[in-house]
Image (tube, coloured by chain):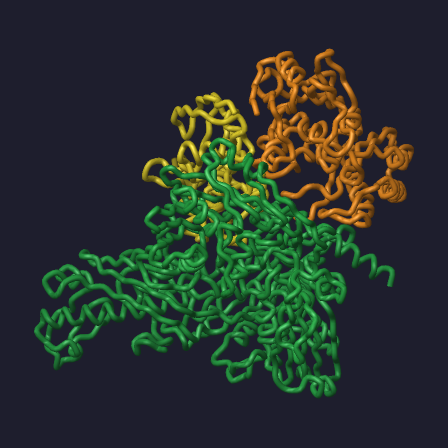
Amino acid sequence: MRYESPGTVADAVAMLAAEAGIAKVLAGGTDLLVQTRSGMVEPDLVVDLKRIPGMLDIQAEDGGFRIGAGVSCAALGEHDELKAMWPGVVEAANLIGSTQVQGRATMTGNLCNASPAADSVPAMIAAGATVRIEGPNGDRDIAVEDLAAGPGKTTLEKGEMVTSVFLPGRPANSGDAYLRFIPRTEMDIAVVGAAVSLTLDDAGACTAARVSLGAVAPRALLVEDAAKALIGTKVDDDAMEKLAAACSAAASPIDDKRGTVAFRVDVAGVLARRACGIALSRARS
Amino acid sequence: MSGKTVTTTINGDAVEFVCGADETLLDTLRDRLGLTGSKEGCGTGDCGACSVVLDGRLVCSCLVLAAEVEGRTVETIEGMASGEELHPLQTKFIEHAALQCGICTPGFLVAAKSLLDRNPDPTETEVRYWLAGNLCRCTGYDKIVRAVMDAARELREAKNAA
Amino acid sequence: MPLDETLTNERKFKVVGTRPNRPDGIDKVTGRARYGADMTMPGMLWGMILRSPHAHARIKGIDASKALALSGVKAVVTAEDFEMRDDDLRDTLINVMARDKALYDGHTVAAVAATSKSIAKKALKLIEVDYDVLPAVVDENAAMAPDAPLLYDDMFTQGVDPAPTKPSNVANVLEFGHGDVEAGFAKADVVIERTFKTGATHQGYIEPHACVASYNPDGYAEMWVCTQGHFMIRDNCARLLGMDLSRLRVTASEIGGGFGGKTTVFIEPVALALSKKTGRPVKIVMSRDEVFRATGPTSSSTNRVKIGATKDGRIVAAEAELRYQGGPFAGSPVEWGAMTAFACYDLENVKTVGYDVVCNRPKQAAYRAPGAPMIAFGVESVMDDVAHELGMDPVDFRILNQAKEGTKSSYGPTYGPIGIAACLDALKHSDHYQSPVPEGCGRGTAVGFWFNFGGQTCVGLNVNEDGTVTIQLGTQDIGGSRASMCLMTAEALGIPYEDVRAVNADTSAIGFTETTEGSRTTFSSGMALIKAAGETTKKMCARAAKVWGIPEEAVEWVDGAARPAGDNAGKFDPMTFKEIAAIAHSTGGPIAGHSEINAENAGEGFAAHICDLKVDPETGFTEVVRYTVIQDAGKAVHPSYVEGQMQGAAAQGIGWALNEEYIYSEDGRLQNPGFLDYRIPVCSDLPMLETVIVEVPNPGHPFGVRGVGETSIVPPLGAIGNAVRNATGMRMLETPMSPPRLVAAFREAAKA
């Protein structure tokens, strides 16, 4: 294995494109190093992006924020403006692993690792976030939900890398929230994750909503039926029950060491309802 | 495998070492630099026994490549006491019997110091969540949390007195 | 005992019972303490182990030629490098290195030594093993089914009459008890019978197994090992390699947790064999994955419990059938499970039957009160249910039926002075029990028992010229016992704690001493030290007598000084310990004491726990809101470390009850060999763990000490099960009481 830490995106892309064997991008390394240690991934080349200017920056852009691919979750949690705008996204990112892991893990890494249980991904999807991809053929922006192709697989082409996440500006009277279920209070992978982002009009009716679930399908789901259950309502108990039902219906999980199908289906609805309640109170405040 | 020469600062001292490209910072500290105070309990970032501070951030040294620390600063348990004088956290851990076997202790101390450096007056809940990535199987955490809270109090009092 | 008339239980202690700083504290807070993996030796090689990916497979052949051809690879060992044997180490040997069959996922099949970790890792991939995969069984009930895959065609169940003619996976059947349970149940007004399951749990010590072995061409060898018993390491390694015991010197490193799991050998004979083959020191350090897959977890179990009582709350009969699987060899702790099941109670009619079952799982190893927590889960659950059925308070029901001095225990012996009554009394009067149950919580209580052990123990006690003392211990310090040893020695000599220093002596520096296990260390090494101290002070009195020119019998040792015994002995100023030490050279030479004992009468341990717990009815998430541990310590030598044992044991029990378990796939592969998915409690999972130390002196120890390391892992499963029942109305029958299981139970209850 070779280790490189290029100073520009162009150099990084050139290295990734030129590598004949397995090339991996290193951001926080909290997934990659675990996988290389276990032999699950045996890269020939690791490209560390953290020495590329801008990768560690959070910058205001078009009323929202552009977050460099090397920004740690801990740094996100320390950014007051970002936290005020997208509390659900930041909370989701801050749930990943321990304090130690927070010091290294990035949202981009969380996304590119393509685990269906990634905490920050449903929150980013609910927020309508996009990612910027740079590669041998230039750059392109795609929706977060279009990046993962399945467990451990992305839609990135050879030589491409995600260089930033963009969180758009938040409309007035909006709120977001993310909740996950784990059996302990910390240190677990989500058994179910649910994110809700919604916008109210002046009368308190929901005009827009996005709902996303994690760990209940091969990749994080954007649940449109759940959003529909909210839009046009005052987000009352009845609407929230319909949202919960839509989430449970959308969930198609597996039985594994972390939970059963029945448990995940049930809890997907429960968490979506609870996250909706938090998003709602944030939108109203 | 090609060796990488790395120049860095560890516990305030300039250090140069050669490492393999896939070598973790933990392996380098332990096997090349003789700094065996950082422990490997899992190698996957789940136990915190290898905690170090990298450029001011608490991290698991098992999840950092040694090559990454070029030009950076690393603080380990070996740098916590100043000469003969223990850090108040170290003293309080002994006084409160906050260790039994002691294997997790260096990681807890490094993590706790990182907390108190940021938050001199943490609540019990803040202490518990900050330290949730440091596993201890001996104590049930009770005396560890008490020791951290007591050290925080002592540090605050010392600061107020100064 | 008592060993010395002056050391009675009524004595007022000067240093025992205080809380000084531990002697090894500084080393451990500065990172200087050297654990298993912290040792290196000149010219050292790295050893690594190839493990079976299959739960059950015939090994048809192993080809290591490609690995051996890799530059830097110095040797490969397989079963061929160990001579087969048919004695008490047979199973250990097969576990250390698979022979014709791999018996579980993670079973060692070969090992390599190379000049670096990365070369060793590469070499493992080049070793070709030809497996014939066999059907596997990992559940005790499935293993007992008539059509179960058999691990061995020559295992015929022991302990049944007539002896079976067909082989099975049941190694042994054991029975304990007295009276007539059938007659007892016939008298009962209430009988409750339920079947419980407990998942297999791992000790979860944070330090993986590690050792360095250095075998010299002259046949002498040294080892550095993280272990609970370096004499056990010496015995096992020397015998497996055909060495005299005197040729192997084993030094115990500082140990990063054991809880029973480091009372046997795994990598150590392999490292020694690799060192012998290469002529160089070899270090092996397990990964966490290896620790989970290949070292001993405890048994999983299935237990039927039946308790009958009359309306007045007296238990008239109690019965249990226990099935424990212990991995691929006989020797699960079902015997101790069957013995401890009803040990807390005074019963006229009691019967327990235990089945020792083999499975394709790693060989079980001792885990804190081995075998007791599993059956206590069932017994303490049914105790609460019987009390509820009778309309009695569960604590009062236990008090009414508690064992006492003179009770014939369910496992045979008659109790001397025991602490269960004092524990339950302390429970009733505790601040926790007296406080109202917090909003939304259920409160559960349970009791637990553990035998505690003594055993063969040597200590040395050297008086230094300046009057300080060095004590040599053969029992490994796994949780701070050096502090308690120094306290007891200081007490017995009448000198300050700070003047006593403890060292853990290697196998060549002290006589044979059994492993640190069974809560025996403070009890038996302490007893030996008190005896050695008595010998020392006797010698000191003789020196004073010599100086004073009076008979030795006319001098007595009081408060750390030799004094004339009574007015007739003459008038002399007392000579202190330091003064006598300073003139030792001119009064007869060095002064030292030592003691070699086989400690008996360890004194039974009892504990009572209270748990307040909240359950989220929609997700099954549980929160332990308040927890109190009450335990009889006999005499708490260093109360902080006694509390620490109580808290640590309770935390492990809480983990066992709520989230910890080995999870297997259909084909018998372990699914969660890491701390991510083997979920031990983290700091934010637990509240402060309140403690109440009860002291009912053990007449078998000069200071009244009882072992304290294990008992408190026994009650938590029942206490939590009872708290869940009182919070939700549901009786959970399986551990861990994990969220998916709780939600499934809620659904069932809603249906019914």
Image side of residue A88 versus residue A9, left or right: right
Residue C42: image location, x then y, percent: 36, 38
Residue C645: image location, x then y, percent: 49, 60
| Residue drawn at x 90%, y 37% as measured from the top left | A229
The quadrant of the rendering that contains the C terminus of chain C is bottom right
Nearer-the-camera pick, C326 or A102:
C326
Relative to C151, does residue C251 appear above or below in the rendering?
above
Image side of residue A163 versus residue C459, left or right: right
Chain C, hue in figure: green
Residue C252: image location, x then y, percent: 40, 53
Chain B, hue in figure: yellow
The quadrant of the rendering that contains the N terminus of chain C is bottom left
* Residue A77 image-quadrant placement: top right
| Residue drawn at x 74%, y 22% as measured from the top left | A156
Image side of residue C576 versus residue C450, left or right: left
Relative to B111, does residue C133 appear above or below in the rendering?
below
Q: Is residue C289 visible?
A: no
| Residue drawn at x 47%, y 21% as measured from the top left | B71
Figure chain in orange: A
